[in-house]
Each structure stands twice: as C-alpha cells, then as structure tokens.
Image (spheres, rainbow, N blue to C red):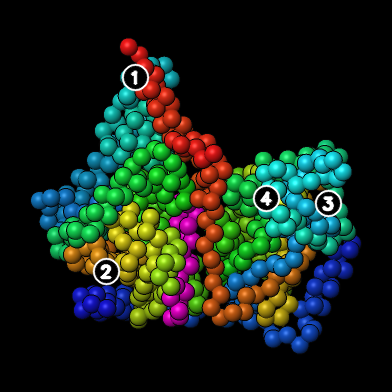
Amino acid sequence: MPRFSMLMAAALAAAGSLAAQSGRVPRTPDGKPDLQGNWSNATLTPIERPAGRGPTLTAQEAAIAEGRTKARTDSLSRPSDPNRGAPAKGGVSLGDPRLDAASGGTGGYNVFFIDGGDRIAVVNGEARSSLITRPANGRVPPRTGQARERLAAMRTSQFGPYDNPENRPLAERCILSFGSNAGPPMLPNYFYNNNYTIVQTPGMVVILTEMVHDARMIRIGDGPRLPQGITPYMGDSWGRWVGDTLVIETSNIHPAQAVGLYGMSSKARVTERLVRTDERTILYSFTIDDPETFTEPWGGEVPFNRLDARVYEYACHEGNYALANVLSGARDEERRKATEEKKP
Amino acid sequence: MKSHRPRSLALVLLLVAAAGRGHGQAPVPRLASGKPDFNGLWQALGNAHWDLEAHEARAALQLQPGQVIPVPASPVRALGAVGAVPSGWGVVVGGEIPYTATARAQRDENRAKYLERDPEIKCYLPGVPRATYQPFPFQIVQSDKHVMMVYEYAGAVREIYLADPGPAEVDSWMGQSVGRWVADTFVVESTGFNGSAWFDRAGNFHGSSLRVVERFSPAGRDHIWYQATMTDPETFTRPWTIRMPLYRHIDPNARLGQFKCVEFVEELMYGHLRKKPIQ
C-alpha cells in the first residue's frame, strides 16, 4: 500500500472511531457498526470539481443550487396540458442537458422517472463542490500515454459504433448499471436509481445496486485472490474491519466496467471505506491506485443517505426493447444512405 | 389456504422433522438470536430443473417428428448427447402437477415449442421456486434483521422481508417474498409475480396469481429440506408441493460465480441486427 493510502487509512479509521465514540450508531450483535438497510448516493455535487471553484460551497451557494433544482422539478411536475400540440422536430429543451439527453425534449423520460439527486453532498459539515477530494484540485489526475491510447481504442470499439450489440455500453445492454453505479467505486449516475441495499453478517457484506440487480459479494477476511485474467464485472472484493471502518479492497475488475470510470484499467486496485457516521448516513470514501492509467492515486468521499423507501426488482434485459431498436435504427439509416447514394 | 393442504403434507413435515435429527450430522449452526444460521452457499442436486415431474431421459429439449421416432430438433442436433435430457424421479409430492385441462394443453404446447418459449433460454430472471433448484449455487445471507438470497444464474436476487410490507406494489419476475420463523423452519411466502416465469425446462408454468409458500427446514449443518407449495387457481385445480434437499457447498473456498448470461444470448436475440449478420 502506498504511503498516501496508509495515511488516508489512518485518518479515516480515526474518523470512524470518532463517530463510534459519539455512540449513536446502530450496531450488529457482533458489535460492528450496522451498515444494513437501503441507501442512496444521489447528489447534485459532481464527481469532478468545475473549473474555478474552491473545494467547498458556502451555505448560501448550496441553498441556491438546491433551490434551482427544486424549482425546475416542481415546474416540470405540473400537469401537462392535454390539448398541447406535438413537440417541435428534434424536441424541446427542458433546461437540463441530462433531461434533454434522456428524452430529446419529447417526453421520453420526465421528472417522474429522473431522480438524479436534489442535495449538495455534505461531509464533515462542509458542502462539497466535488466528490473527488484527492488530488486537492478535485479532478481526475492526468492519464498516462498508455491510458490515452486505450481510451481512444475504446471509443472506436466499445462505446462508439452501432455495428454489434457488443459495441454498446454495458448499461445499454442491461449488463450493469449506468456509469460507475455498481462500481467499484460506487458513484452516483446523476440520472436515476442510485439506490443500494446492504446486508451484513460477520462473514459477508452484500451490496446490492438496484440497477441492474447487481449484488457485490464482499467476503470478510482474507483468502486466495482470483488469478489474473479472471475478471468478474465488479471485480474480486475482500473486506476487513479496521476499528469501526469497513475497508474493502478490490482487484480484477472487468475491463469493460473499469474503462467506464475515466478509462481505468482492469489492473486498478480500488479501496473503499464505509463509516456509519450517524443514524441516516454512511460516509463512503474510495481510492483508486492504477499506475497504468493515472499519474497519481485519486479518490473522494460520497455520503450514502438513508433511503426511506423500498428497492424494487430491476429487470432490465427482460424488457430491453431499446437495444434492438438502437441496432435496427442503425441498419435502417444505412439502408436509407445506400438508397440516397444510388440516386443520380 | 390451510384447509386445502393435502393430508400427506403433514406426513412429509413429520419426515422432514425426523430427518433433521438423525444420521449423526453436525448440529445446526445458530445465530446469536437462536435461529438456525443458513448463511452459506447452497445447491439442489438432481434433475428437478429439467422437469419437476417424473420423466424418462430423452434425446433433446425439443424434438421434431422423425421417420421412425421423434428426433432432436435441428437447432440442437449438433449437441448430441450433451443436449440430451437426463431422467428424473420427480419432486412433486403425489407425482403429478394438478393442471386444469386448459393449462395442461398449454404446458404440452410449451414443451413442443420449448426453444422459443422457455424464459431461461433468453436469460430472463428465473422466478420462484425455479431459482432454488437451477443447476447453479445460490447464497443465503442472513442476519437478524435481513435475509437476502443471491443466485448465480443471471445474478438474480431477492430480499426476503422479515416484516410484511403489505400487498406487492408491482408485479415482478422474482415476486415479493416475506419470511417468518415457525420453530426452526424459515417459511417464505411469495406473491406479486408477473406470470412470465416457468418452473423447469419441460414447459411447466404458472400464471400471475401464483402464491408460493417455501419452507427451509434445517437437517443438520450441511442440509436443508426445501419444500414449496404452489397455489394458482388460474392454472391448477388444487395447491401442490415439491420437496427436495439442498446441499451446502462445504469447500471453504466455495464462492458464488458470475453467470451474467445476458451477454451470452445477444447473438440469439440481436444477431440478426448486426451490421454484418453471422451466417
């Protein structure tokens, strides 16, 4: 473990024991902090810090950001006019790039479906401007030359063309959830279904990501690691308790899942730390060590807030009409183009 | 529900209870609360996943008329013996699934058109109780407050609620499961099914009004007697029950594998939409 991570571990273990000393966190029968239940990591705070921002927001800045989101949600939640005409060709902008990307402004997904978070992430009383806290500028560190080549290749094979189902992103194929939702690291997708269920025993912690019913099975203890080349989508995870902090170390992450996180490689080691800070919060922090991809380790902190709601079955593949439509749409476009070219 | 239960079931329960005590097995592990501790990796052995009813071995999952006897359907012919169906003595208490006449005809048609109808072929979620006896392990993760069952097949998952949240709010493949303890038996009642799942690879099916009551009874450290009673008046003339043992994976390094079969069926489901379809 690099010295950087050791320092972080020490700092976080200290934070964990502070929380424990406050004495109000629920515990399991074996005395560990109880992480069980339903949680959400949806937030308005972006993963990377916007240029020109400091690491924190003032209370007023946070209130303005949250108020803006609430106002837009309230406005878009008003009943539709049943006599309205069809939207203009290409759709009508809803004032949020995510909404526009999801529906083209034609009403595909409205705010009833979209639940990208309505709160700024607050950690240790600070309203955060980014989830990334290391390096100090709150941004993903520069990539190595090798990583830039890998990303370029990915754009032309995995997430680019419409030639084959395998060229489409994992989420579009209903293999895993959006972005790095299932992780590791488990980060919000800023869209919907940022929900998790944790079940915990002395020997095992399960973290279920609602989308696409992805259960990470984290064994507590130490044992043989998977050989190189065996890469389950969410990798090979072992957990251990350091004081009141659950520390999870993961390797062997599937290349197709890893690359989705800023081009991470399957040789990355991801360290996650979960501390139950109070009745309604788990402080989740992560560190990524991937020297083949990033010029330095990086990581951050994300509050997981108690979800006062149930987690439902996310049967994605069973109703995946989109993938067939995406591919057949591309075939149709090719046919039209061929017909156009034949015209004199 | 109780009034419909066949009398033979009481006998079965007695036998199950007796099995739990005998054979000099290691004692049932227990949680601090005193409840049996089912944490671990479990799997049914046997051939229930091919066909819940007693059946002889046959040449393939789907047959077509031959010149003398039915022969394997062309799409599966190349698999030879690997594609054949092994025999099974059946796990249905009393022998036969009590279909209504209409439902039995549909079952037979399902079997004849197996390749286009079994949801397992498309890697769809398995439903309950099928998830339990598929030829894959599943893991029970059980604390005092939560029980989750995680299945290797398709990464299927179900949380077993220990407090009844009321009627299922939405229909689903895996249904809504509520568990309670009756002495040492974990009784799980599941409803809210969407009616699209099957029971096995032999066309046995149910409708959306299915209610499943499963009983997980410890039989020593490494065995569970598993029993499931199905009630669905749309499909069956009376409730019926299957029972089989579940076996613990005792290798200390045993772990749930990844069988995300969605990607394995993309060629089947979307291959014709490739830019250059594979001939």
The numbered mark 4 sits on a residue in which chain?
B
Residue B147's image quarter? bottom right
Relative to the observer, which residue lies in front, B32 or B110?
B110
Three-letter amino acid code at disc 4? Ala
Give the image location of residue B37, x and y in percent: 62, 76
Task: Say which of marks 2 and 1 sits in front.
Answer: 1
Q: Which mark is residue B78?
A: 4
Residue at image point 32% right, 56% down: A259
Is disc 3 surrounded by few (<14), some (14 to 19) or many (20+) residues within 10 Å? many
Residue identifier under label 1: A341
| Mark 4 in CB contact with mark 1 (< 8 angstroms) | no
- Cα distance in 3D space between marks 2 and 4: 47 Å
Residue marked by disc 3: B97
Which element carries disc 4, helix, strand or loop? loop
* Residue drawn at the location 36% of the way across and 36% of the way down: A102
Is residue A324 in view from this perspective? no
